[in-house]
Amino acid sequence: MFQVRTDLALEAREKFDEDNVEIKGVRLEEEQATPDIHISSVIIETENGAKAMGKPKGSYVTLEAPNMIDEDEGYHREISIQLSKVLKRLLPQKEDFTTLVVGLGNRAVTPDSLGPRVVDNLCITRHIIKEFGRYVIGDSCHKSVSSIVPGVMAQTGIESMEIVRGITKETNPDIIIAVDALAARSTRRLNRTIQITDTGINPGSGVGNHRHALNGESMGIPVIAVGIPTVVDAATIVIDTMNNLLEAMSQAEQLRRISNSYEKLDMMEKYELVHELLTPQLNTLFVTPKDVDEAVKRLSFTVSEGINLALQKNEEAHRY
Amino acid sequence: MFQVRTDLALEAREKFDEDNVEIKGVRLEEEQATPDIHISSVIIETENGAKAMGKPKGSYVTLEAPNMIDEDEGYHREISIQLSKVLKRLLPQKEDFTTLVVGLGNRAVTPDSLGPRVVDNLCITRHIIKEFGRYVIGDSCHKSVSSIVPGVMAQTGIESMEIVRGITKETNPDIIIAVDALAARSTRRLNRTIQITDTGINPGSGVGNHRHALNGESMGIPVIAVGIPTVVDAATIVIDTMNNLLEAMSQAEQLRRISNSYEKLDMMEKYELVHELLTPQLNTLFVTPKDVDEAVKRLSFTVSEGINLALQKNEEAHRY
Amino acid sequence: MFQVRTDLALEAREKFDEDNVEIKGVRLEEEQATPDIHISSVIIETENGAKAMGKPKGSYVTLEAPNMIDEDEGYHREISIQLSKVLKRLLPQKEDFTTLVVGLGNRAVTPDSLGPRVVDNLCITRHIIKEFGRYVIGDSCHKSVSSIVPGVMAQTGIESMEIVRGITKETNPDIIIAVDALAARSTRRLNRTIQITDTGINPGSGVGNHRHALNGESMGIPVIAVGIPTVVDAATIVIDTMNNLLEAMSQAEQLRRISNSYEKLDMMEKYELVHELLTPQLNTLFVTPKDVDEAVKRLSFTVSEGINLALQKNEEAHRY
Amino acid sequence: MFQVRTDLALEAREKFDEDNVEIKGVRLEEEQATPDIHISSVIIETENGAKAMGKPKGSYVTLEAPNMIDEDEGYHREISIQLSKVLKRLLPQKEDFTTLVVGLGNRAVTPDSLGPRVVDNLCITRHIIKEFGRYVIGDSCHKSVSSIVPGVMAQTGIESMEIVRGITKETNPDIIIAVDALAARSTRRLNRTIQITDTGINPGSGVGNHRHALNGESMGIPVIAVGIPTVVDAATIVIDTMNNLLEAMSQAEQLRRISNSYEKLDMMEKYELVHELLTPQLNTLFVTPKDVDEAVKRLSFTVSEGINLALQKNEEAHRY
């Protein structure tokens, strides 16, 4: 079955709505967490559902906040708090556990730098707890947290997955939280959506397209992935415009005939047609907003605060 | 007259070739500088030519080297040498003069960071010459060179042009060389082309769209601009694909009818149609290659070496 | 008169206490702003006082907070609030004025990067107000604020003072706030003290030793300087140890004789002796803590928040 | 036995020369590689020699070039060539082997950023060879090279050694080259000396003081360490000045008596005295030149080029 390229389960599911198709084994739950924050959960319950969605079985929680990138409001602590609540539901339900946070992506390419930047602002405690015990660091940071930025294969020659697996075997965390920039289907979702999933990072995910899975199976421990879409595939903006064009055509008298036969193509045929027609270079291109630097800076704070709040006790500390 | 969005005069001119239109007042000269480096000069000689091209009167030299971003060859010293030769033709024809190099763009957005990165590797001498005289620094760096990275308006609140004019009045250079990332029409030209012009930076140029001119008129001294296209406008890849689509359609039996009426639109109508149909967000998007970090790193060395060679004597020093 | 190298007026004054000398024309005021924050004001009232202190006439307010660099407390909003109160006393006493914030120092040398990093987190409004008027940006940011990071002379070939003067003439702000890393006399004060002065930046100040004044006289408008000591002069740690040594000697029987004649040297003679004996390289060295990266990161947030609060209305926004 | 804090075996040995002590089991070889480059090899042959030197058995080759940081000469390719020759003697003597280069240190603290910056400019091939075979990448890069920048414990919560061991087990390189910034005894050696050793990185080494060994024993494969001193311990500049002082004293009539008894202390007693007298903060301070940013930038190119030349065939490519 054909899949429009998106890392967001919510978008993968929406496509079925558009096509008026019901998918068995996929459940959707919605919740208005605050007046400004909408939370949707796509739960893929069966292998058939996974096949239809093109994504592994598991929970995909999407936090949408239209004002997430408004500048004059600071880093949006209320989103961090909602993120921490979602994370807490997925984290081990016990008093104490150890976490390795992985910042995936390329620090040198702005829209792909979300993961490394999130790691920069985490409350890291493993080395302190290992040396002094957990009571020395006070109430606000008492769980063991470590982190790694594996870098990109062009710089290291090593798959991120290999690096993380090596470190996981050496340091034995109970759980991994992997943070990554995602590709969305719709430009409307760029920098406005956080996806949290218990399925980890799977082939085809992320801006940089890490080829090997970083998930429970490959790591031997649970992997939670947190992602924000910061780019869209170049092909998707072409097909979006094409559809707009055809809609306009069907309304304009003189263009009506054009659209008739094209309209008969289904979504998949259209997408494949576009992909075929894209110049070869286009496959290595991405589309991103011009103010992506400010957006990624702000969003990385929102996400690191969410993780800090989920892993540590104190909701009061103001980090920067 | 309608203009496809491109900062490259060569591309602006090519459009007329496509349309089989001759443009008066615009001259083209071509030269194969080395087996791998092709140099084209578009010289806009009259106001009519300027109007037709949508660019001010002056010389636009384009250096094309298909292998400019091949990695295993280092930073391409042979391109730096050709760039320095082109620059020397535009620089003052006297033994001694003072230069201010301006690195335009946003260091935090990878494809827009070319200008700031070029400045990082220049041979800066003004302060040494001012304090010790020019004989102290040896043969390799004897002309006075200063530089500034004005930053972006979102960070400074000030137009780049205002910053550069203030510094120009204060330090009185004889000439400005402004380096900037450009937007191309064709993805094929990304990171493979250097444009050198004696017309400076004009409204609409550059990735970040500096609104005010940084040219001879606004600065009171000659301004040479050096640019490399690192992004394309999101609209251009849509229209490229659309054209490919229609060409394919005209060949496919079942799609023939679609293309008939659309084909009758001329280039301008197509472009305006596409722009109208693009979602509003698209106007703030750009398209760039995934390996833009490596490309900009390498290209910035090529350009700074070219400027160093043009302004200083010694062609033998290996900088990094 | 001999001056121990320090950018802190408080330390310059303390020396006289040590020597039991009273200084006419220099007034000291002290205030415990909060249980954790102590504020001292050194006011140099006469030319004689200025001569004795080696610093221009004016107010030097010092904000001391021993826990300023404690990590687990975030960025210390309470210090930002006190800083904003001190700044408000020195800023124009009218509803509306325009400010240029200058981030002095070298972004590439960690302890010297305070100024550039402070600028990164300011609420910049000049371009928005200029284009849309001040009502568009809401209550929290209504005064016009612009900024510049002039860079260092080795990179630009231009004195910071020249760059700032050029931009000041071009953009006409009402007041300049210059932020810079300072050199302290005592390692105990490193990263724990903020000095705010209405005298600007004067020769010999700062880590990088900007040679020309950036003050009311050179700029034509008031200049407030905000600084934090992040390094000490290599010579000062030598003389500190030397004094400890001699004290220890005077107590140890077998070393008593050594100290006798050395002790007779006064402070100035000792310092000059040490400076003479330092190897020539030492003059270009500085001493800084190993965790200076974390300290500068945190302190730069504290200072930019203080400036944001002083220049804008809303004390509630959480920036990052 | 007392050890002056230095990571350079050459300096550790020089101390014995000063004291006119012969050390058994330690051999010194000297060679003038070029008119400007002096190479010394300290070979510690026995356990007694290791104990006397305070360093493990093995070869410590020191490359000294007084002009290593002269700016106008570029990045000193001739030093890279000598470095590659020394490395080749220590690398496996076979046609093909795989190497993991480790960039130790803190990218955010300028003098400690040497290791990460060296890695930025390496020719990384492992992923290409793994996917396409070694013949695809041409003559210039045919050996498998991967790299990792483990970061610092304050950011990761994990020892560098643990990270490297995990990745080593996962990717099975034949040899590790670890690059690190070192602490020297003498300010004269800062940024002018490269030490290459087959003993790896051992406790107490490096600017950041990695506590656990990264050597053949802990990794299970040979570890070559390449280091450049970029800082000196704060205590060493105190004792240097102290010695200068006492020498001056012994010559000055009025100070003669002071020095008599102090002079009787031997080197170790003096150093311990100074360490005791240093204020507690001093233990966390380091001393570094003001232009350390330019020096580290240039030196990191010299070292990465040396490693590139040692691991790949072609000496002709100009990298940047």
Image (cartoon, coloured by chain):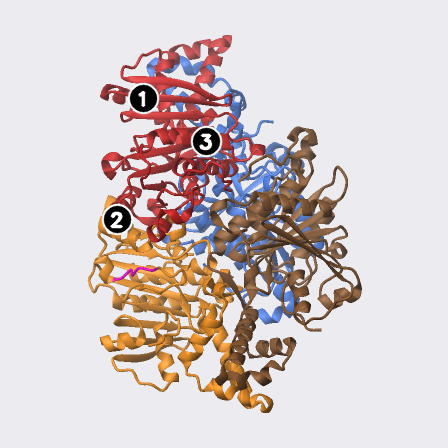
Chain colours: A brown, B orange, C red, D blue
For discs 2 and 3, the disc positioned in front in the rendered view: 3
Circle 2 is placed at which residue position? C170
For discs 1 and 3, the disc positioned in front in the rendered view: 3
Whichever of callouts 1 and 2 sits on the residue coming sooner in the sequence is 1
Label 2 marks a residue whose chain is: C
Residue B187 visible somewhere in the drawing? no
Q: Residues within 10 Å of mark 1 (few under 14, many from 20)?
A: many
Q: Is label 2 in a helix, a strand or a loop?
A: helix
Most extreme residue toward the left is B94
Three-letter amino acid code of the residue under disc 1 = Ile
Is A256 drawn above or below residue C43 in the view shown? below
Most extreme residue toward the bottom is B253
Three-letter amino acid code of the residue under disc 2 = Glu
Question: Magenta part of the protein: which range?
Answer: B211-215
Task: Evaluate if marks 2 and 3 touch, with contact meaning CB atoms under 8 Å apart.
Answer: no
Q: Do marks 1 and 2 both belong to one polypeptide chain? A: yes
The image quadrant that residue C33 belongs to is top left
Q: Is label 3 in a helix, a strand or a loop?
A: helix
Circle 3 is placed at which residue position? C81
Query: Distance from label 2 to label 3 (Cα)?
Result: 32 Å
Label 3 marks a residue whose chain is: C
